[in-house]
Amino acid sequence: MTRMALQRPANDMGDARAVVEAAALALLGARTLERGRRYVAWGAVYDGRRRGAVLRARCEGSGQEAWRVRVTLDPTGVRDAACDCPMGETGDCKHVAAVLLTYAREPEAFVEVPTVDEALEGVDASGLRALLGRLLLQRPELEALVEEALPASFARPSESARGRAAALLRGVWPGADLDALASRLEALRAEAVEMREVERLAVAIVGRRRRVGGDGGPVLAVARRCVESVAAGLRSADAEERARGLRWLVGLYGYDIEHGCAGVVEALGRTAVAAALAIATEGERRALARRVRGAMARGDEWARYAWGAVLVELEEGLADDEEGWMELARAHHRPAARCRRLLALGRVAEAWTAFSEVADVELLTLTGRFEERGLGAEFTEAVKARAARAGAAGRERLVAWLRGREERADEQAALGLAEGVLAADPTRAALDELRQRAEALGRWGEVRERAEAVLDAKAPAVLVAWLLEAGDLAAARRVAEDERARPAGFGASRVAVAEALEEGDPEGAARVYLRQAEACVAQRGRASYREACAMLARVERVLSARGREAEARALREGFAARHARLSSLRAELVQHFGPLAA
């Protein structure tokens, strides 16, 4: 263990913040100490105790666990330390760092506890006291058990708003009643008088991101409101407070880096950075950029990459070397920032290239920039194309944006937007809306073909249901007989078409049933083979009712011949229909 002079007795260290931090730095190193600071900020350390020169506390980990930490001080520094986390045997983990830093900053959070003899004073069990005394000399970790058995002997410090928030969040894990927890945290936010209390509440929440679920959770929504409150307060703050508050907003991103969330658009740190950018002056942005460069110099590879994304946005439009900035934006995969800057420079063709690289969830942040350049219509068409191929996460918001445009557009433009919505969201509701708009303009004939092509490719079950309802059995039969791969569950649509065809087009019905039998075989498995036999039985029933038993038998035997190598299918066919032709 590295030692450092504390310049005062270990029992009298309440005001020795700088000395304790220096001792912690010497023991643990700058990187571990920095990680410990983040744990301190979100209130991970609790149940602090001091018995003589020995500090004990619990420290929440990044998962659900809470680790026990013990640190022994002496006049020359940290004599020894230990944590029961996987990395804490030698006492040089981030949890030890967090406990030391908490003691340096809030010594009152460590309640001075009596000795074991003092705690048991008045208990008529002298033999037990002696035994416990000997045990504790040999096994100091048993002290925690004594404390838990005699809670009245140990005082507890009063808690700040951050402390109360930490206590509420302690032990929370996804699946808990997060709505109720969010309500209690929101009450703490509303009660906060000073901006810094609001900031501490946000940090207490973000430090437990893994405990409270995804970015849209009710608890993280409280943290976002904290960020909004801070940003709103900074608009009217003096220069010194603005500078401090802006540093806090950007610094919140560091907690997302710790949790690996920094690249997500909705992550709390990204929200805080966006809030800072919205109110920062050019000079404030330059000052923040200098701090970010310092964080990049101190961080590891992931931290440098993640902070680089913030640096790109802080220096957008401020860099003397535009091409150098473009390279920085490219290296940190910030195509939206490049697109904005290229539009500002009038380099529209390059901006469209950058646009193609922008993630679906970030696409709509560029709406105003394209409209400012008179490219609103082109941007809308690009969004329509993107929505049609977007994943589930991005599609919902893009479709909602298109619907909003549709409501405000003239009739012709609204029709085009409705087609875009159907391509992105091929549902019956989208089809009905498109048809209503097209019929109002007398254009349903030309639009219908395109709509059917979209549904045939993306939602054939929706198309079949609509065609059957419209009585267009010929078109429904074409969709049902198509040999292209269809989504799971489309078999029910085929059967519905075949049943509708039985009366007027028995041959067509038989062919659709036969097509479904082939689809069942493609799924493999005895259950699927039995379903295929059921479809063949329907073929036989439909054709036999018209006196075409020989044709039905020929279709069944041809089916068996095509799949002769499938012994399990052949066994099912024999069981259903008797011996097959050789």
Image (cartoon, rainbow, N blue to C red):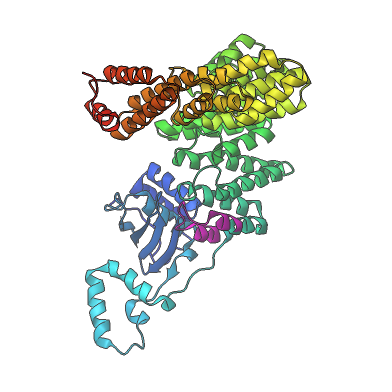
User: Which quadrant holds residue 260?
Assistant: top left
Picture coordinates of residue 114, whole percent (x, y): 38, 76
Q: Is residue 168 magenta?
A: yes
Picture coordinates of residue 54, whole percent (x, y): 35, 65
Decide: is 241 above or below 20. Answer: above
**Residue under the point 50% across and 52% down:** 42
User: Which quadrant holds residue 76?
Assistant: bottom left
- Specify the principal SS of the magenta part: helix
What residue span does the magenta drawing correspond to?
162-183
Residue 365 in view (yes/no): no
Residue 26 in view (yes/no): yes
Quadrant (top left, top right, bottom left, bottom right) of the C terminus: top left
Decide: is 431 above or below 167. Answer: above
Q: Is residue 210 magenta?
A: no
Picture coordinates of residue 518, whole percent (x, y): 36, 22
**Residue under the point 56% across and 47% down:** 220
